[in-house]
Each structure stands twice: as C-alpha cells, then as structure tokens.
Image (spheres, rainbow, N blue to C red):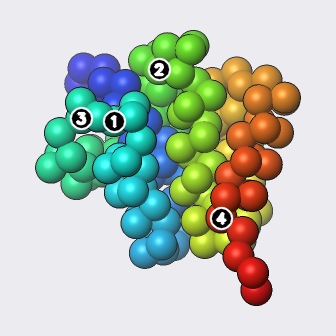
Amino acid sequence: MSLPSVHEALIYLMIVTSASDRDMADIELGSIGEVVRTWPIFEDFDKSRLLDVAQDCQVLLSANDGLEHVLELAHQVIPTRLRDTAYAAVFEVAAADLEMRLEEARILQRVREHLDIDALSVAAIEMATKARVRTLT
C-alpha cells in the first residue's frame, strides 16, 4: 500500500480518536465531517472521498499493530509545519461530545508523541478548543 496523502492521514487521526473508546458517537463523526468541510487545510480535498478514506483507515486499524501503523504513517506524511493543525483537528473530534474519556486521553497523548507537538502548543490548542465548544449549561 502506498503512503496516504496528508488529507488522508489527517482523517485517519480523527477516526482513530473517535474510535478510541469503541464508540464512534454521531457527534464525533459529525465533527470529522465539519472539519473536512470547513477547515482551510481541506479546501482541495474531494469531500466525496471521506467515507472511502474512513474505510481505508478501518482496514489499516484491523491489521496487526494497526494503531501504531496509522500513527507512524501520519508522522511520515504530515509536514512538521502542519502537525499542530493535525493535533487541533484531532482534539476537535475528542472535544465534540464534551467529555474526555481515558481512552481518548491516551490516544491524544500518542498523537502528540508521534507528531512531536510541544507542550505549549498542546495547551494552546486544547484551551482554545475547550473555550469554543463550551456551553452555558
């Protein structure tokens, strides 16, 4: 199998995050779709391919050491200058349901480690996302 595109790797990371707790909630899936539809990083991505890319990710994850392989692919293809954007997309999905389960926290940690995201960037991304998704209740 050839290396995924940067778009595909970003989607893989969002899918992995959503699936981390074994429950891909509709709100998380909706968040993935929203990121792909609205973020500038995806402006030249063919949105009709989203389901196919998600299925490709499922195939990769079902293989032996699937998660590690997906994380390594992301590390290989996502340029350093876009790694904070990748983490922002991943955290957007994790924050969509307004609760952070232990499994999601572990996946976020693995993503940070594989993409080598510094602590200040992580804190800024997480704080901005939490502020944006906060509700009155």
Quadrant of res 7? top left
Mark 4 lies on residue: 133
Q: How far apart are marks 3 and 4 (CA)?
A: 25 Å
* Quarter of the image that includes the N terminus: top left
Q: For residue 78, which numbered disc appears in the image?
A: 2
Image depth: mark 1 or mark 2 in front: 1
| x, y percent for residue 126 | 75, 47
Q: For residue 42, which numbered disc appears in the image?
A: 1
Would residue 49 be found to the left or right of residue 60 on screen? left
Would residue 99 be found to the left or right of residue 39 on screen? right
* Quarter of the image that includes the C terminus: bottom right
Image depth: mark 3 or mark 4 in front: 4
* Amino acid at the residue labelled 2: Ile
Q: Are marks 2 and 4 in contact (CB under 8 Å)?
A: no
Q: How far apart are marks 2 and 3 (CA)?
A: 15 Å
Q: Do the residues labelled 3 and 4 touch (CB within 8 Å)?
A: no
Would residue 33 be found to the left or right of residue 56 on screen? right
Q: Distance between the residues labelled 2 and 4?
A: 26 Å
**Label 2 secondary element:** loop
Q: Are marks 2 and 3 in contact (CB under 8 Å)?
A: no
* Amino acid at the residue labelled 3: Phe
**Label 1 secondary element:** helix
